[in-house]
């Protein structure tokens, strides 16, 4: 299959992306977090194609993306009353909520679970498309199973070219890591995946207690220890170690720093990351892609700060380092 590259700035291309989705095809779409691999959520045969294209096990549930709050009750049941005020603050945005599933929601989306994950994405073009076509899409990140999540159309094509009908190029994703996942209950909420919206940021808007796993627990089904992997082997080191560790022989070594830049690096490639967590997050996956593109065998990544704002980055980093 030839994968079309569509331009999110061209209304004709956006229209075509919507038509392809309606016709049951797979289209990679930009969201504010990472690119999603979308299929019409109402068509189980279309959703099933996602698993084949990604090589993802079929029992891993998918997030359903909606364009308006009114769509929520078509997919979720027993929606706690307190949720509406939360969505008023954080939707559209990088917050996925896990609800009891509505009987309309097909098994292929939920992986047979009694619950369903839903979010309203904040990318303006995607949101417009969902609203104009009155569509809901099931969309995991648009990468082959266990590989890096893409934050640009090029990165989507690097993994899925020829396996999907089209990619809608909406530029680089503004946020850069996947949404925070919050399981909502009648009288409590639980963070299942750390993300750009931290527990501390959520807390003032919650009228129920939020439970956060102390360390990242792999509470999310399909949230494997080994994930987000580049080809290079990753070592998380402190700055001193990056400066002085002996270089392994016959290996191409890249370093990713967040604190002040080195004048020069004894290894082969160096990426200087921004030191504030938001800009770092935005660059994170693309830096790993870039180092893979340079043919690095080993990546020395400077351990970022350990405060709560960096929790999602630590989560992605430690799983990328897992062999
Ligand atoms: O930002 C994001 O969330 C991106 C963009 C495309 O929206 N999507 C994304 O999807 O990261 P994916 O499939 O790569 O990760 C979704 C995670 C998986 O770990 C899955 O197990 C979990 O959400 N999930 C989905 N439905 C669930 C449910 N009902 N209960 C528990 N976990 C669920
Ligand atoms: Mg993913």
Image (cartoon, rainbow, N blue to C red):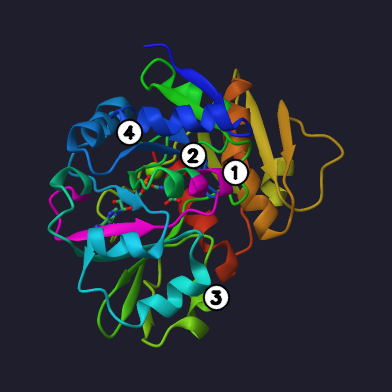
| Residue 177 is at least partly visible in this image | yes
Q: Of the two numbered discs 2 and 1 on the same chain, state the one appearing first in sequence.
A: 2
Q: How much space separates mark 2 and mark 1, taking CA atoms?
A: 7 Å
| Residue 298 is at least partly visible in this image | no
Q: Of the two numbered discs 4 and 1 on the same chain, state the one appearing first in sequence.
A: 4
The residue tagged with tag 3: helix, strand or loop? helix
Image quadrant containing the N terminus: top left
Crowding at mark 1 (Cα within 10 Å: few <14, some 14-19, many 20+): many
Which labelled disc corresponds to residue 35? Answer: 2
* Place of residue 145 in the rendered image (x, y in percent of width and height, measured from the top left): 34, 34
Asked if residue 44 lies left or right of residue 141, the reply is left
Q: Quadrant of residue 42?
A: top left
Q: Of the two numbered discs 3 and 2 on the same chain, state the one appearing first in sequence.
A: 2
* Place of residue 18 in the rendered image (x, y in percent of width and height, measured from the top left): 42, 34
Which labelled disc corresponds to residue 22? Answer: 4
Q: Nearer the viewer, mark 3 or mark 1?
A: 1
* Place of residue 306 in the rendered image (x, y in percent of width and height, measured from the top left): 58, 65
| Highlighted magenta segment, given as a residue range | 110-128
The residue tagged with tag 2: helix, strand or loop? loop
The residue tagged with tag 4: helix, strand or loop? helix
Q: Is residue 113 magenta?
A: yes
Depth check: give the residue in front, 279 or 316.
Answer: 279
Asked whether the beta carbons under mark 2 and mark 1 sit within 8 Å of each other, the answer is: yes
Crowding at mark 4 (Cα within 10 Å: few <14, some 14-19, many 20+): some
Q: Decide if ligand 1 comes within 8 Å of the CB at mark 4.
A: no
Q: Decide if ligand 1 comes within 8 Å of the CB at mark 1.
A: no
Q: Decide if ligand 1 comes within 8 Å of the CB at mark 2.
A: yes
Crowding at mark 3 (Cα within 10 Å: few <14, some 14-19, many 20+): few
Give the residue number, with chain letter if any, for mark 1. Answer: 173
Give the residue number, with chain letter if any, for mark 3. Answer: 201
Q: Nearer the viewer, mark 3 or mark 2?
A: 2
């Amino acid at each position: 299959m030839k994968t079309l590259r569509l331009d999110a700035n061209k209304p004709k291309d956006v229209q075509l992306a919507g038509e392809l989705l309606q016709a049951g095809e797979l289209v990679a779409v930009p969201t504010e977090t990472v690119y999603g691999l979308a299929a019409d959520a109402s068509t189980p045969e279309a959703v099933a194609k996602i698993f084949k294209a990604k090589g993802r096990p079929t029992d891993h549930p998918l997030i359903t993306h909606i364009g308006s709050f009114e769509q929520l009750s078509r997919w979720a049941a027993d929606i706690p009353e307190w949720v509406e005020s939360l969505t008023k603050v954080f939707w559209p945005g990088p917050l996925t909520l896990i609800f009891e599933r509505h009987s309309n929601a097909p098994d292929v989306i939920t992986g047979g679970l009694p619950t369903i994950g839903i979010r309203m994405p904040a990318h303006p073009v995607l949101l417009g498309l969902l609203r104009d076509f009155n569509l809901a899409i099931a969309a995991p990140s648009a990468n082959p199973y266990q590989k890096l999540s893409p934050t640009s159309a090029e990165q989507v094509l690097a993994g899925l070219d020829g396996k999907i009908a089209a990619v809608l190029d909406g530029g680089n994703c503004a946020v850069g890591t996947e949404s925070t996942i919050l399981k909502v209950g009648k009288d409590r909420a639980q963070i299942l995946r750390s993300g750009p919206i931290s527990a501390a940021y959520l807390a003032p808007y919650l009228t129920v207690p939020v439970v956060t796993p102390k360390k990242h627990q792999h509470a999310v089904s399909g949230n494997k220890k080994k994930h987000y992997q580049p080809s290079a082997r990753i070592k998380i080191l402190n700055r001193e170690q990056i400066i002085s560790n002996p270089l392994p022989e016959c290996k191409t070594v890249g370093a990713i720093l967040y604190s002040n830049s080195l004048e020069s690096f004894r290894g082969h490639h160096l990426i200087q990351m921004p030191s504030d967590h938001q800009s770092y997050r935005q660059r994170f996956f693309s830096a790993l892609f870039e180092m893979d593109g340079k043919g690095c065998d080993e990546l020395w990544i400077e351990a970022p700060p350990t405060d709560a704002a960096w929790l999602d980055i630590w989560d992605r980093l430690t799983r990328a380092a897992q062999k």
